[in-house]
Image (cartoon, rainbow, N blue to C red):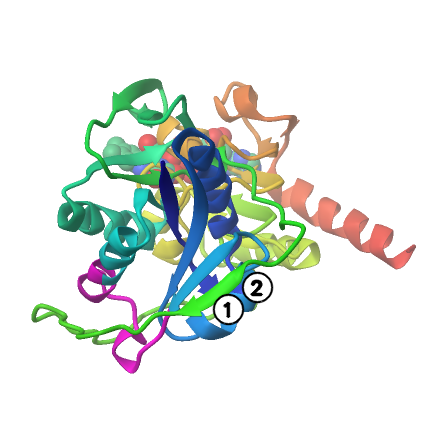
Amino acid sequence: MGNILAFCEFTDGVLRSSALSNIAFAREAATHHGGEVIIILVGAGAAAAGAAASKFAPKVITVEDPGLANYLAETYAPIVAREAKANNATVVTATATAVGKDLLPRVAALLDAGMASDIAKTTGKDTFIRPILAGNAYSTVQISTPIICVTPRQSEFEPAAELGSAGTVTASAAGAIDALGASFERLDAQKSDRPDLGDAKVVVSGGRGMKTGENFKVLEELADLLGAAMGASRAATDAGMVPADWQVGQTGKIVAPNLYFAVAISGAIQHLAGMKGSKTIVAINKNKDEPIFQVADYGLVADWEKAIPELITEIKKLKASR
Ligand SMILES: Cc1cc2nc3c(=O)[nH]c(=O)nc-3n(C[C@H](O)[C@H](O)[C@H](O)COP(=O)(O)OP(=O)(O)OC[C@H]3O[C@@H](n4cnc5c(N)ncnc54)[C@H](O)[C@@H]3O)c2cc1C
């Protein structure tokens, strides 16, 4: 019998929605390993986020220290590995976000654990299914080490619901922190009032067919009306139309919102790999033969220059009538 240690990301005292998918996976793993889910929160604000996290698991461990104020895999990994051992964890998990994908392989190395990355499904105690070749094939991997490290894909696990009663929250001391010569210099992040692309319930993405960065303003207006995050194809980000961190796809972010707008995006497999887990996909493209229409729930063959302003007008009318 072993426990499941779930490393969860948080912002402003609450778990990120991507973390809820990690907890959903951890609960599934707990049924196979017979133990309980233990959430670990590390970094600035961990103690404050403990109460919110305790609604999702019977036990929460928080580790906060000035030396952990900014994420560094070098400083976080030893703490996660230490808590895994101390809490008899046979599985250590983190959502396959940029942080999760950076952190867990290092945790695995410290624990001599096998690693299953980017998994879409679990079929038993040690067997996982993961997409390969931009989502065109699935491989089944079996891990034979006593401890297993896993990064589940947010898009494949429904966010976990709160439990009936809150779990315990325990603060654990960071101990000696050694960044192994690495240091945090600065974070160059785009400041935005919109939701984070990875957590958003609605995403409005534009592609090369938007032609210029200026033209994205109309998509931003649509996004703001819907409370959506902005996304883009790699063709649009590579052309410098919009920031690189808007990129959705195989080499960008993987998103799974309730509603995804693909505007002037052809639907190359590398783009689909990042958004085809969306619940409802709306495609607007002037060419009816584009592959995006094969995954779309609603397809509109139209020029965005006409369709998007019309859509904005109708949404405004609908909002005004309420
Ligand atoms: C290793 C690798 C990794 C990659 N990773 C990614 C990734 O993570 N994400 C990603 O997106 N791509 C990725 N790509 C690139 C990918 O193969 C495509 O080149 C890219 O997705 C195309 O972007 P697009 O659909 O915006 O452009 P295009 O394929 O050029 O499509 C533009 C679309 O706009 C439509 N259009 C034009 N004008 C209008 C108009 N006025 N109104 C309506 N529609 C219009 C056209 O019909 C067309 O469908 C990767 C490629 C490689 C090789």
Q: Specify whether 247 is left or right of 265.
A: left
Q: Amino acid at mark 1?
A: Ala
| Outermost residue toward the front in this view | 1
> Helix or strand or loop: what does disc 1 sit on?
helix
Residue 129 in picture, x, y percent from top left: 35, 23
| Left or right: 17 in relation to 259 | left
User: Residue at left 20%, top 60%?
Assistant: 78
- Label 2, label 1: how far apart the Cα atoms are: 6 Å
Q: Are the two marked residues, 2 and 1, in contact with CB atoms closer than 8 angstroms?
A: yes
- Residue 175 picture quarter: bottom left
Q: Is residue 197 left or right of residue 301?
A: left
Q: Check if residue 224 falls in the magenta segment.
A: no
Q: In the picture shown, does residue 121 fall above or below 248?
A: above
The circle drawn on residue 49 is 1
- Judging by the rendered image, the residue that carries numbered circle 2 is 52
The x and y percentages for residue 119 are 36, 32
Residue drawn at x 74%, y 45% is 310
Q: Residues within 10 Å of mark 2 (few under 14, many from 20)?
A: some
Estimate the x, y position of residue 207 in percent, counting from the top left: 46, 42
Tell me where the magenta segment starts and ends, as one range: 63-78
Quadrant, the C terminus = bottom right
Can you say which quadrant of the picture contains the N terminus? Answer: top left
Asked if residue 167 shows in the view, the reply is yes
Q: Is residue 73 magenta?
A: yes
Along the viewing direction, whichever of 309 and 12 lies nearer the viewer: 12
Of residues 217 and 116, which is closer to you in this image? 116
